[in-house]
Amino acid sequence: MTLDPHDRTYSHDHDHPHDHNHSHDPIEVTQGAGESEIMVHAITELLIAKGVISGEDIRKTLEFMDSRTPALGAKVVARAWTDPQFKQRLLADGTAAVAEMGITMGEAKLIVVENSKEVHNVIVCTLCSCYPRTVLGLPPDWYKSRNYRSRVVAEPRAVLKEFGTEIPDSVVLRTHDSNADMRYLVLPERPAGTESWSQEQLAAIVTRDCMVGVALPKAGMQ
Amino acid sequence: MTEVINAKFAPGDKVRIASANPPGHRRVPVYARGREGIIERICGAFPNPEELAYGFDGLPKRPLYRVRIRQIDIWPGYRGSDKDVLELEIYEHWLEKA
C-alpha cells in the first residue's frame, strides 16, 4: 500500500488513437488525497509494518462490513412480529437473540427497544456515531451529523417532525444515547393491515430509518 | 449474561451522575453531568473506556448501567411530554446514590 501522488493521476495526452471510437474527457483525479486520507494510509502502513494487523485483516473487515445491511435488521424485526417467543428473547437479550439468526455482534451488545401505543424510541450517539452496524450496516450521513446528534437529545419531537414523523404528546418519547458499550435497535410497531403478510413481505416495509426510530413502517409501502 | 457482576446499584435505584469535569477521555456527555435519574438496567461489566483510550487494559471491568432521566430535568423549557425520558449508559464510578 503506497501513497505516491503520481499513482493518482490518470490523465494523458489525447493525440494518439484509442481502441474505441468515441471521444471523452480524460479520466483524471483532479484533487490530491485529503489530510484524513493521507493519515489513514499512514496509520494503515504503520500497523501493517509493525505486524499489528495484516492487509488480509483489513480486507476481511471491509468485506464483513459490506455484508451488513439494513435487510438484516428488517429480518430480525419481521421475525419478532410473527414469533412472540422470539420477540420475548429479543427484548430480554438482543445479542443472544440475533445470534440465533446467525448475526454476531462483536464486542458491543445489542439492546432492542420496543415501540408501542404508549412509547416511541429513537436512537442517537451524541459523543461520536455509535450505530448498530452489525445489524444495519453503515450509518447514514445525517446520523453522524452534528445537527442530528446535538438536537435529537434536546428536542427529539421537533427533529422527528422534520423526518415527517409526528409523535403525539400522549406517547412517551424515549431517546437513547448510545454513548458507551451498547448498540440499539428499535423494534417498530407492526402496522395494522399486515395481519396476513409473510415474514418476507413484512421485512420489506421495515426500513433503516424505522429501526433508528425516525420513521414508522407503513403497510402502504408494500 | 453469565458473568457475575458486583454491582452497587439495582434497577429502580435513584442515582445522581457526578458533575465533575475531569480532563481526558470521558464517555459521560456534559448534558448528563449532575443530573438525577433512575437505574433502568445493569448492562454488564466492561473495561473502563477512560483507561482503554490511553492504551491500558481497562481492567478491572466496571459495572455499566443505563440511567433514565426525565427530559424536563435536563433541558429547561423542554417541549414535549413531561414523561419523555432520555436514557444513556453510565459507568458505576460516575454514579452516587440520590
Image (tube, coloured by chain):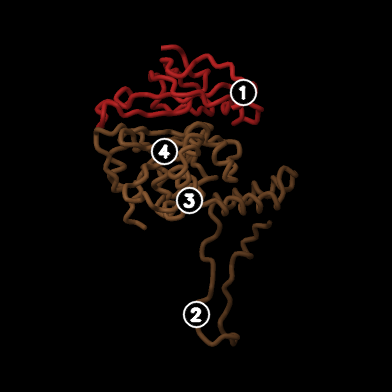
Chain colours: A brown, B red
Measure the C-alpha gap from mark 2 to mark 1: 60 Å
Nearer mark to the viewer, of 4 and 2: 4
CB under 8 Å between callouts 1 and 3? no
Identify residue for label 4.
A123
Above or below for A183 versus A205: above
Q: Chain letter of disc 2?
A: A
Query: Earlier along the polypeptide chain: callout 3 or callout 2?
Result: 2
Q: For mark 2, what is the residue?
A: A24
**Residue A129 percent coordinates (x, y):** 47, 41
Q: Between label 2 and label 1, give the one nearer the viewer.
A: 1
Q: Residues within 10 Å of mark 1 (few under 14, many from 20)?
A: some
The label shown at residue A70 is: 3
Q: Which residue appears farthest toward the top when viewing the image?
A: B97
Residue drawn at point x = 60 percent, y = 42 percent: A104
Q: Amino acid at mark 1?
A: Lys
Q: Nearer the viewer, mark 3 or mark 2?
A: 3
Residue on which disc 1 sits: B61
Identify the element where label 3 is drawn. Answer: helix
Q: Is residue A147 above or below residue B90?
A: below
Residue count near mark 4 (Cα–Cα under 10 Å), binned few <14, some 14–19, many ≥20: many
The mark that comes first in sequence, 3 or 4, is: 3
**Disc 3 with disc 4 on a shared chain:** yes
**Residue at 60% across, 36% down:** A107
Q: Is residue A148 left or right of residue A8?
A: left
Instruction: Give the label, 3 or 4, closer to the camera.
Output: 3
Evaluate whether label 1 is on the same chain as label 4: no
Q: Amino acid at mark 3?
A: Pro
